[in-house]
Image (spheres, grey):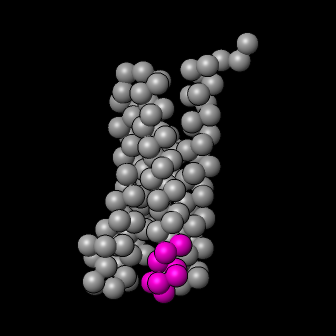
Amino acid sequence: MDYKTNKAWQRCDDLVMLVYEATLGFPREELYGLTSQIRRAAVSAATNIAEGSGKGSVKDYLRFLYQARGSLAEVEYYIHLAGRLGYLSKEKREILSEAQKEAGRALQGLINYWENKLTPSP
């Protein structure tokens, strides 16, 4: 399975790029703090989808997709925190939040698809 053609991975990859761009303006003292955390969480979401696609079973793949979903939840909080700290403008927060939500919706669709494959309806 080629993860690069997967809509959920594409949305997560887009989110990574937006996060990197947005965090360029964070204070230097946050380089090993919030900047690193939000970047790692965003990258983790895309990475887990990619890694899971190489696993041998649907059950294993789903485990990685659930990890990706958790990483997106982290990104959501970090966007909130960066806004409260004044590191992101309202406009950038909205752009990042929408990208995070889009990635989450696509990922949930992928999870639903594979969960249905694993336990088909009677």
Quadrant in which the N terminus appears: top left
Q: Main secondary structure of the magenta part?
A: helix
In this picture, residue 105 sits left or right of residue 72: right
Tell which residue pokes out farthest to the top in this image.
122
- Residue placed at 46% from the left, 68% from the top? 78
Q: Position of residue 26 (x, y in %)?
A: 37, 82
Tell which residue pokes out farthest to the right in this image.
122
Give the vertical position of 53 relative to 86 (above or below).
above
Give the vertical position of 121 relative to 22 (above or below).
above
Please tell me which residue lies in front, 120 or 103: 120
- Residue placed at 36% from the left, 27% from the top? 55
Write down the quadrant of residue 29 in the picture.
bottom left
Please tell me which residue lies in front, 81 or 99: 81
In the image, the segment drawn in magenta is 80-87
Q: Position of residue 80 (x, y in %)?
A: 53, 73
- Residue placed at 49% from the left, 55% from the top? 72
**Residue 109 counted in the magenta span:** no
Q: Position of residue 108 (x, y in %)?
A: 60, 43
Q: Is residue 52 visible?
A: yes
Write down the quadrant of residue 31 in the picture.
bottom left
Please tell me which residue lies in front, 16 or 70: 70
Q: Is residue 3 visible?
A: no
The tally of labels here is 0
Quadrant in which the C terminus appears: top right
